[in-house]
Image: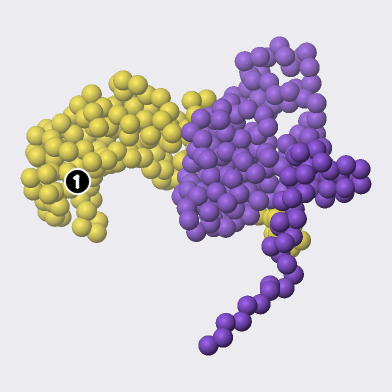
Amino acid sequence: MEIVRREKAGGADSDFRIRQLRARDLLRGDLEGQDLDQYVEQRVLTTTLDKAVDWARGNSMFPATFGLACCAIEMMSIVASRVDVARFGFEAFRASPRQADMLILSGRISIKMAPVVRRIYDQMLEPKWAIAMRACSSSMGVFNNYAIVPADKFMPVDVHVPGCPPRPEALMHGILKLRSMVQEDPTLGWRTRYGAERTVEVLPEDSERFDQEAAVNVFRPGDTAGA
Amino acid sequence: MPDAPGVELLAQELREAHGDAILDTEFFRGKAALHVAPAAIGEILETLRGQGFSFLASVHGLDYYPQEPRLGVHYELLDMQLLDRLTVKLRVATDDARVPSVTPAWPTADHQEREVYDMFGVVFEGHPDLRRILMPEDYEGFPQRRDFPLGGEPVFFTYNEQRGTAYTR
């Protein structure tokens, strides 16, 4: 039996070898003039620092470990193997709001719980984002009654994911929407949508700061969360 | 369960001890109930405890709107030896909703009386710590009363708006 050896078409191996040699030449300082220009043009990508930072931020958000109701079950399953959110860098749920970038409101928020949620949101460091998961925290869904308050009333929300509860894929879609929002148009944050550019957030305790600078907060001094 | 004659016999025994405080008896769908005067609830439950009903399973409130007196408090008792259940019911008016607390004698009633107070505004006199338990401390009104508005937020969906059926207002 005769063994026929045939060269592979395209010569991918030799291309690789050429790239290796050119990289070696560059590192040694042997490339000069037009060769050097051509090499840099092919190999180096230029961008702005903002874009690079946004790219990194959008791909490594840490959600807070914070479940409010039945939707928390769906939220948990986005880190499981079927819709693996770790593919996009969102898998590191942080137990402390100070280490988290993203708050997923997974459930209905009662009037009594709203100050707690708001405090957790305030404890998160900028830049921070919030996803209102399910109908309850956006339009209140079936719990539209005296005890529940929509999330938009007391904190800025970037993405609403409706559903009762939404499937993990839907939450995933919301997270990817948030990612593209962060990466492609960073000005689309809540400050733009709420007309709050160049403002600072003020806690109810620092009441005198309201008079000193442009401040945005749902709580005026002396307000309570009650009806 | 005490059967229909059983609850009459029980009521008769209680009438000997408490006189007019036993207002009525009821036997409906296999469930025996006593209607009592609010002021005597503590003593009546003590007597029933002596009869074997040693477990207070539940305390809950009701609003009988539009009947008067509107508010009701139900005490569900259980005899754990004979597996007998008995409901003790009382009625109070909204403008004078005062009921003696049974928490000193039945510690399990603590949170349940607070819940009835929170939701219906029945004041349990003698309760050691009568505060709201579910709603925020500064909430106004008693949300489970029938004349309390359902509340909530108006939600306008484009679909409903176009058809003129935006029912949540």
Residue A54, by quadrant, is top right
Q: Is residue B71 left or right of residue A96?
A: left
Name the residue nearer the viewer: A213 or A56: A56
Q: Please tell me the colour of chain B.
A: yellow
Query: At which x and y percent is residue A125?
Result: 63, 27
Name the residue nearer the viewer: B106 or A24: A24
Residue A109, by quadrant, is top right
Query: At which x and y percent is residue A164?
Result: 54, 55
Q: What chain letter is assigned to the residue under label 1?
A: B
Name the residue nearer the viewer: A211 or A225: A211
Residue B62 visible: yes
Residue with the most extreme right position: A34
Residue A89, by quadrant, is top right
Which residue was labeled with disc 1? B86
* Amino acid type, label 1: Leu
Q: Is residue A60 left or right of residue B29?
A: right
Q: Is residue B16 left or right of residue B150?
A: left
Query: At which x and y percent is residue A204?
Result: 63, 19
Q: Residue at x 31, y 20 (%)?
A: B128
Name the residue nearer the viewer: A26 or A121: A26
Q: Which chain identifier belongs to the purple chain?
A: A
How many residues crowd around disc 1 within 10 Å: few (fewer than 14), some, or many (20 or more)?
many
